[in-house]
Amino acid sequence: MTDNKLPMRAKLATSLSRGAAALSRATGRGDGSVIGGRIGLMVDPNLLAELAAGRQIALVSGTNGKTTTTRLTAAAMSVLGPVATNSLGANMPTGHTSALAKAGATPYAVLEVDEHYLKQVLDQTMPKVVALLNLSRDQLDRAKEVAMMAALWRDALPGRGLHLVANADDPMVVWAAGKAVAQGTGVTWVAAGQRFHDDSWVCPECGGSIERNGEQWACVEGNLSRPVPHWTISGDGVVDQTGAYHQITLQLPGRVNRANAATALAVAAQFGVPPAKAVPELAKVASVAGRYATVVRDGRTIRLLLAKNPAGWLESFDMAEDVPTLLSINARDPDGLDTSWLYDVDFSPLRGRRVLITGDRAMDLAVRLEVNEVRFEHVRSFNQALSLVPPGRLEVIANYTAFQDIRAELDRVN
């Protein structure tokens, strides 16, 4: 909906939202992606629905990969015209409201959605397509148990007249989508992969065990099994649902990002974007809210990788090169206060590599690495780590606030 067609109250709320966001950015208090939406919704609680009306919208949700897949999807859909998106990862209704208010009138929107808020955002935005990436354990002191999250999705999705793009390799996602698909919702299955299996050994439908044989998986007692994927990863490219192969050149590392790209292409295809036109747009994405960014400082080429939970850490180990690696762990409110999740991560891929550790909870990480027989050096700060490694590459893997601390340190110098 254009600003001119908004009700008067929504116009006022939109104006105040933009103003609050701009003031936040100008004063260095933040990027404005939360406060703008909060102010707008205080003035008009229905503002998100008002701003969503008239746009064709895609939602992207899951435990990991939301921000990157959203960024890639927005890039793919940009061939159609202007796309509103919450590119900085503010993935709750305040962030969605702020993003749509800031963008103004656009025909399309791609919104990352925190998995806990999917039903609420579905109700308010009436999307054309919803991408379901994965479900795995996250912050233990605030996140729902995985099967409970899958059940909430399963109940929220049916009867909405939307199309699903879903990960065929995650049993929890397949089950969550199952009721909607059985009731006629269209679905595109993507072989997006699942490296972390610890949350999907038990069938959420019947409690039977799930067995795997290569790429295939199935419940040994019930009917839940891996659907035949429409999109697959093949080498450095993807194969679409017509069988056509598309070479993908990404600036983002790892198989997981090729899978994110495949999901983005599958979503864009539902809006009529030919994959051949979208692929070049994906190659332009170099960094996502600082993730995967490469910075040169004092002769060191530093790459930043964000990892927030066990599945994310395993994917980061796959992306990181065999060079000196700094691990940084905090346990502040945005990270979750409980660090026991460290014992769900297999750190053995780091054996033989020079590993440095820092952060508020570095000692928790130290104990975990000792258990995994990974040698490490404790450093007091990011700057000390830089002084200890020789010129060359340095991989940095950090959880949320630790990642932001290191980004801030680099910004102060560069």
Image: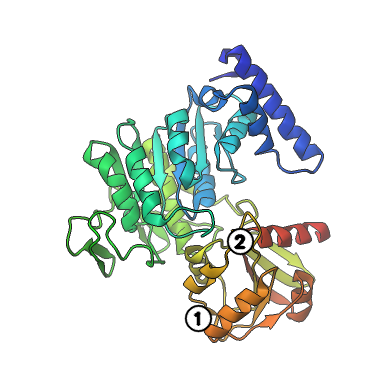
Residue nearest the observer in this picture, 189 or 356: 356
- Relative to 18, is 204 on the left or the right? left
Residue at point 61%, 62% (across, down): 399
Residue nearest the observer in this picture, 128 or 366: 366
Q: Are marks 2 and 1 in contact (CB under 8 Å)?
A: no
Residue 325 in view here: no
- Image x and y of residue 14, in percent: 65, 23
Q: Nearer the viewer, mark 2 or mark 1?
A: 2
Amino acid type of disc 2?
Leu
Which residue is identified by label 2? 337
Mark 2 or mark 1, which has the lower sequence index? 2
- Relative to 221, is 73 on the left or the right? right
Category of crowding for the residue at label 2, using alpha-carbon neighbours closer than 10 angstroms: few (below 14), some (14–19), many (at least 20): some
- Image x and y of residue 83, in percent: 54, 34
Residue at point 52%, 57% (across, down): 250
- Image x and y of residue 58, in percent: 45, 37
**3D distance between C-alphas at marks 2 and 1:** 24 Å
In this rendering, the count of numbered labels is: 2
- 409 is higher (above) or lower (below) than 177: below
Q: Where, by quadrant of the figure, is residue 208 drawn?
A: bottom left
- 307 is higher (above) or lower (below) than 43: below
Which residue is identified by label 1? 348
Residue at point 30%, 36% (across, down): 158
- 308 is higher (above) or lower (below) than 275: below
Residue at point 75%, 33% (across, down): 22
